[in-house]
Amino acid sequence: MQHAVPPAHEAAGWSAPALSVVIPIYNEQEALPLTVARLRPILDGMGIDYEVVGVDDGSTDATAMIMQKIHQDWPELRTVRFARNSGHQAALTAGIHRARGEYVVSIDADLQDPPEKIVEMYELALEKDLDIVYGVRSDRGTDTFFKRRTAGVYYWLMRKLVGKSMPNQAGDFRLLSRAAVDALKSLPEHQPVYRLLVPWLGFNSGEVVYVREERVAGSTHYPLSKMVRLALDSITNFSASPLRLATWLGLLSFLVCFCLAIYTTLQYTFGSTVPGWSSLFIGMLFIGGVQLICVGLLGEYIGRIYSAVQARPAYFVGYDSAEDTAVAVRK
Ligand code: UDP
Ligand code: MG
């Protein structure tokens, strides 16, 4: 998917800023003003040209209105609004594709990623000439027990699949150079999972350690269903090994059935008249379970092949302040 730089932006005579900050935003009416209040002085204090690309992922609360208001007072904030909720990764895609900076930082809208660390990331990238700086969570004490456990399993599994190049506990708070952004933009991914794709790119990378803070307001938009979707996208994006797992499960079930067959034959031979319905029932359940798992796995991959063939865009932009000539003229 190619996203051309909007002409209105060019017409406004903007040159590429040194830094772009991408923020995916979904129903953050309480958190957003607090985030902006903390982020803006930090960016202003860096003494560089910057832009902020706020991607409203189809919010249904007052987020759009609040963003519009902030934009009027803070022209560096570009507001992009999706036609409907398309997911965190799609919002990141839109932001990364529209960002024009030499470096691009992505950060959550709920202040769980401390914006002060942007300065550290930027300075580290310049100093060591890095293309990627990961924000690595040193402490998830503010997350729930459930979130910590599931995240632990997720990162363990992903590092097995992607390899050790994926830093442990690195989410979507990171800095990318223009070269890394252009590399990402050239990928034809339909359901990108950036925390896996970015380490896969290679490039020189560094880390900035931070403490994951408490969500400043509102509540998480990552219910179990979205977490499962992200995990499935992550696995199927990067590995066909679950398909191999299906083969192993099939072999295992064959082995168990073979043993059961010997056991039943021996019982029959030695005249035991145990009805044997339980072993039959267990065997049937087991095979049925294995078959369902295998069919489910195939379904996951086929579903992804199907949506890749359909080639539908991952999101639709309903509004972009950079293309809004009325706003551009006002500026
Ligand atoms: N988000 C989004 N679309 C969604 C869900 C979340 O753009 O469908 C944004 C959200 O506004 C926040 C970031 O993605 O800026 C991370 O979401 P959240 O804080 O709810 O997730 P958690 O930190 O609990 O994993
Ligand atoms: Mg959060």
Image (cartoon, rainbow, N blue to C red):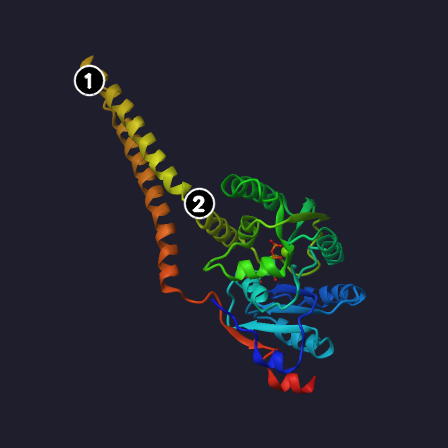
The residue wearing badge 2 is 239
Tell me the distance, in whole angstroms, between the alpha carbons under discs 2 and 1. 45 Å
Classify 10 Å Cα crowding around label 1: few (below 14), some (14-19), many (20 and above): few
Nearest to viewer (mark 2 / mark 1): 2
What secondary structure is marked by label 1? helix
Quarter of the image holding residue 100? bottom right
In-image side of 273 versus 318 (left or right): left
Percent from the top left, x then y, of residue 131? 64, 54
The residue wearing badge 1 is 268
Residue that protrudes farthest toward the top in the picture:
270
User: Which quarter of the rendered image does ligand 2 occupy?
Assistant: bottom right
Q: Are marks 2 and 1 in contact (CB under 8 Å)?
A: no
Amino acid at the residue labelled 2: Ser
In this view, 283 is above or below 38: above
In-image side of 213 versus 47 (left or right): left
Q: Quadrant of the C terminus?
A: bottom right
Percent from the top left, x then y, of residue 224? 52, 51
Amino acid at the residue labelled 1: Tyr
Residue appearing at x 54%, y 69% in the figure: 58
Quarter of the image holding residue 164? top right
Nearest the viewer among 213 and 138 is 138
What secondary structure is marked by label 2? loop
Residue appearing at x 47%, y 52% in the figure: 233
In this view, 311 is above or below 69: above
Classify 10 Å Cα crowding around label 2: few (below 14), some (14-19), many (20 and above): few
Residue that protrudes farthest toward the front in the picture:
129
Percent from the top left, x then y, of residue 257? 28, 28
Percent from the top left, x then y, of residue 61? 60, 71
First in residue order: circle 2 vs circle 1:
2
Q: Is mark 1 within 8 Å of ligand 1?
A: no
Q: Is mark 2 within 8 Å of ligand 1?
A: no
In-image side of 50 versus 170 (left or right): right
